[in-house]
Image (cartoon, coloured by chain):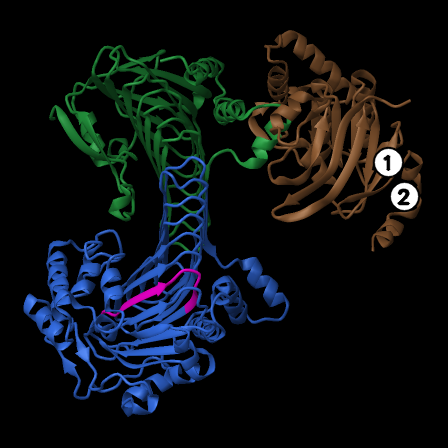
Amino acid sequence: MKENETLKINPLPSKTWYWLHLNDTTVKWNGNVQPCMVTTEEPEQVSEAGLNIKEMTTGAGAEADTLFSDENLPVLQLTAKAEDGERIIRLDISGEDKENAAGTVYIATEENAHVTVIEKFISGKKAQSDLAFRTKLYAKKNSTIRLIQINMLDEGQRLLNAVGSVCDETAKLDVLQMFIGRGDVYNGIQTELEGDQSELHTEIGYIGQKQQSLDMNLVVNHWGKKTNCDIQVDGTLKDAAKKVFRGSIDFKRGSSGSKGAETENVLLLGDDVENKTIPLILCAEEDVDGSHGATIGELDEETLFYFAARGIDQETAEDIMTKAKLEVLYHHIQDEETERIVADQLTKVMSNDSQ
Amino acid sequence: MLNKQLLNVKDLYVDVEDKEILHGVDLSIGEGETHVLMGPNGTGKSTLGYALMGNPRYTVKSGEIWFKGKNITAEPVNERAKDGIFLSFQNPLEIPGVTLSSFIRNALEQKTGKRIKLWDFKKDLEKTMAILQMDPSYAERDLNVGFSGGEKKKAEILQLLMLKPSLAILDETDSGLDVDAVRTVSAGIEEYQKTCKGSLIVITHSTKILEALHVDYTHVMVEGRIIKTGDASLVEEINENGFGSYETQEQ
Amino acid sequence: MKEKSQVEDIDRSIYDFKDDEKDAYRIKAGLTPEIVQKLSKEKHDPAWMELFRLHSLQIYNEMAVPDWGPSIEGLNMDQIVTYVRPNTKMKAKWSDVPADIKNTFERLGIPEAERKSLAGVGAQYDSELVYHNVREEVAAQGVVYTDMESALTGEYADMVKKHFMKLVKPTDHKFAALHGAVWSGGSFVYVPKGVSVEIPLQSYFRLNAPGAGQFEHTLIIVDEGADLHFIEGCSAPKYNVANLHAGCVELFVGKNARLRYSTIENWSKNMYNLNTKRALVEEGGTIEWVSGSFGSHVSYLYPMSILKGRDSKMEFTGITFAGKGQNLDTGAKVVHIGENTSSYINTKSISKDGGISTFRSSVVVNKGAENAKSSVSCQSLMLDSESRSDTIPAMDIRTKNADVGHEAQIGSISDEAVFYLMSRGMSEEDARACIVSGFADNVSKELPLEYALEMNNLIHLEMKGSIG
C-alpha cells in the first residue's frame, strides 16, 4: 500500500451526472495502516464468525477494503449464541498514538440469538490522524443484531466507518449511529436483506460544525420476500459544515411484498453550509412499496413562532432543536453507561468554546 | 372602578397573505380583567390572537398595539412573550427530543434571564400539574409528542401557569374537549386568575368554558371588526340567539 | 388466483405509416469534417456557423459517451445520416406543400389543429421545415416565428448569433456537441416586450427517413413582460434501423415574462432521443414545462431551468410511460441563483411489459439564492415485475434559508382500488385503465385539450387488453 492512497469510496449504486460529484467520494488516505486499539470486556473470540462473512460488501465500497487488507491488523471474530440471552458487546475503538490505524470486527449470530454491539470511536492522541474501522455482521434466522456506533473523534481526526451486513430469514438488524465528534466522517453501510421477512431499521443523527465534512452512503438490497427497511436520518449543519447523504433502497426482482422507506431532515444553520442529498429507489418488482422524503432548510416559521411565543429567541430555539434531534436517538441506545457518555459528549460538542 | 390599562389595540388592520382579515379593531383591556371574544367561524378572532402575539405571517397594515404603556406593534414575538403576553395554541408544536419539563424550564430561564434551580422547578411543576390533573410522568415526555387533544390543551395551560404572564390569550382552548377536560382546563384558568392576577382574552364560540369563570366584558367579532361589546350577560344572549342578528346587522 | 390483465403494446397505426423518400437529398452516412462542411454549404450557412459546426465536431470527437444512463450501444454514428432534405422548399400554404408530405401532416392532424386552435405552425419533415405560417394578427403584434435557417440570415440574425448555443454549449455533453455540428431545421420565435400571444404556437417534427437523425434547433426569446405558449410535437414511423434525435431547445424568458413549453414526444421505438432543453429565466419570469414522453427506444431528457433573476419561477409537470423495449430516462434540472426563486417539479412514471423508466433530477440552490423554495414530487407505478422503475433525485443546497422538500413513491396498482371499482360494476381491465388514467391526470390537465385527448388516447391504447 502506498503512503498516500487515493481512494474512491461510498459509491452510489446507480450513477448519475458527474458534475454533481455524488457518484462516489475521492479521499486521500494513508495506506500504511497500523493496528487500531479495540478495548472490550471478555468477548469470546471464535475462529470462524460465519458463512462467507469475509466476502460481504460494505457501503464504503471495494476500494475502501484495501485499507483493511494488511495481515497485522486486528480482526475480532465474535459469535452471539441464543443461550446467552440479551447480550451487550461494547467495543471502544481508538487509533491511540498512531497517525493512521485500522481494524475489523466480524460478528455473527446463531439462530434466535439477540445481541447488541456498541462501538464507540474514541479520540486518539495525534491531533491529525485517521481511523478506519470495518464491521461485518451476519444475522442468522430469527436473530437480532443491534449495532450502535458513536463517533466522538476530535477535530482533525477522520473516521472511515465501513459496515457490511446480511440478514437471513426473519432476522432483524437495527443500526443506530450518532456522529457527535468534531472530525470528518466517511460512513458506508450496506445491508443484504436476503431472507424472507428480514428487516433493517436505521437511525442516524449528526451534527456538523466548522469545516467538518460528513459523507454517508447507505445501500439496502431487498432480495427476500416481505422484507422491510426504514432509514431515518436527522441532523444539523452549522458554520461551513458539509454533508453528503446517499441512501439507496434497491428492490430486486422477487422481493415481493417488501417495503422500504427513508426520510431525511436537515437543519441548516450555517451561512456557508453545503448539503447534498440523493435518495435512490431502484425497483425491479411490482409488488413493493417504496418511498422517500426529504426536508432541508432552516427551522420553519411555525416552530420558530411557537418558541418565540414562549419567549425563546431564535438562537436558543435552534440549539434546542439541534440537541433534540440527537436526544431522541440516544434514548434508543438502551444502555445506561453508553447513554451517559453520549450525553456528556453531546454537551461537549454543543458548547461553543470547546475545541 | 376602572382598572389600570394593560392592553390597548387601536384601529388595527391586519393582512394574512395579502388578504385583509382585520378591518380596524379597537380593544382595551385593564389589569386583571377577563374578556371573552366571540363570533362566527372565520371572522378573525384567531387572527387577532396571532397579531397580538406578533406572528410574522400576520402583517399589521395600520393601527397600533400598546402593552403596559409601550407600543409593541413592531416588537418581535419573543420580546412580547418576555413582556408578559401568552398565547395558547390550538395545535401546539410537537418536539421529539425535548421534554415538557425542559421546554418550560428553558422558557422560564429566557424570561428571567437566570438559571433556575432544578429542584425548586420540579417541585413547582409537579404541584401545578396536580391542579391540572396531569400525570407527573408527562413532565418527562417529549413535548406534545403522542399527547391526546386534551393533554395538549392541558400542557398549554400548564405553561400558562408556570410562565405567569400578565395577559393570556386562550384560543379555542375548549374546542374538542369532553366535559371533564373542560372542567379541568377551567380550573387551571381560575388558578391563573387567582394567583397571577392576570388578564385574559378567551376566544371561544362555545360557552361551556365560561361557566366557571368571572367574565368582565364580552366582545362580538364579525367579519374582522368588533361590532358589539357588553358585559357577561352578552354571552348568555348569544348563547340563546346565536350570531344571526349581528350578521344581518353587518349586511 | 386471479390473472392480471395483459396489456397490449401501443397501437401506433396513427403514427406508424411511412412515406417513400422521393428525390430527397441525402448526405452520406457518418461524421467527418468533410461531411459537416458539405452540410454547411448545402444549408448556405453564414461563415461563423460553418466554423461553429467544425468546432463542435471536434468537441464531439473528444467527449466520451455518458456511462450513467441507458445504454446507447445500438446507436452507430457511422450509420446515422445526419441530413436528409425533403424535395421541397418551405411553404406558407398547405396547398403548396407536396401532396405526400402534406398527407403525412394531415394524418397527424396538424393543419386541422392550426385552423382550430393555434396561432402559428411550423412543420419539419426530416431535416428541413416544409411549412411555416403564423396568423396575421399575431405577426402584426411583432411576433416573429420562422425557421432557424431564415432567422440566421434575416432581420434577427444578430439576435440569433448572440443566443445560439450560448445556453446549451457544445461542451455540455457529447450529444450537444453533435447537435452543434449537424443541427438543421427548427424554429426561431421572438415575442417582443409586453406582447401576450393568446393562443399557442406549435412546431411539429416528423422524421420519415430510415436511419436518419433529426437535429432541429429551437430558439425562443420571450422579451420583458411578454407571454407565450409553445407546443412541440414529435413522431416517426418505425424502422428496423436506429434513428437518432438530438435536438436542442434554448429558451430565454425575460423579466416578468412567462413561457409555457409543452411537449408530447411520441417517437417510434427505434428512436434514440438524446434531447437537450434549457431555459434561462430573468427577474420575475416564469417557465412552465409540460412534458409527456411516450415514444423512443431510449430517451435522455431533462429540461433544465436556470432561475437567474430574483423572484423567477419554474414549474415542471411530466409523465413518462415506458412500455416494451423502452428505456426512458427522464426528469428535470433546476438551478436557483436569484433570491426568492421557486421551483416545483411533479412527475409520474409508468413502467410496463419490460419497460424501464428512470426519474432523474437535480435541484441546486446556489449560495446567495436566499429564500429559494423547491419542491419535488415523483410517483412511479409498476404494472408488472418484468419492468423496472428507478428514482434518482439529487439535491445540492448551499443556502441555509432555502426551503427544500422532496418526496417520492413507488408502487403498484392497489388491489383494494381495483376491488373497489370492480365492486361498483367495472371490469378489471377498465378498473386498471381507470386507475392509470387517474394517475396521469395531473399532467393531462396541464395540456391543451387536443393534446390531453391525444395523451389519454395513448394511455387507453396502452392499457387496453384482455384479461389473460
- In magenta, the rendered stretch is C215-229
The quarter holding residue C246 reads bottom left
Q: Position of residue A300 (x, y in %)?
A: 53, 36
Placement of C196 over or under C387, stated as above or below: below
- For badge 2, the amino acid type reads Ile
Residue in view at x 34 percent, y 61 percent: C251
Q: Where is residue A312 in the image (x, y as percent from the top left)?
A: 59, 23
**What residue is pinned by disc 1?**
B218
| Magenta span contains residue C239 | no
The quarter holding residue A156 reads top left
Q: Where is residue C127 in the image (x, y as percent from the top left)?
A: 22, 76
Is A264 or C44 nearer to us in this picture? C44
Q: The brown chain is which one?
A: B
| Magenta span contains residue C217 | yes
* Image marks 2 and 1: residues in contact by CB distance under 8 Å: yes
**What residue is pinned by disc 2?**
B238
- Magenta span main SS: strand
Instruction: Please tell me whether mark 2 sits on a helix, a strand or a loop.
Output: helix
- Position of residue C402 in the picture relative to residue C266 (left or right): right
Q: The blue chain is which one?
A: C
- For badge 1, the amino acid type reads Thr
Q: How crowded is mark 2: few (under 14 residues within 10 Å), some or many (20 or more)?
A: some
Cα separation between marks 2 and 1: 10 Å
Q: Is residue B176 visible?
A: no
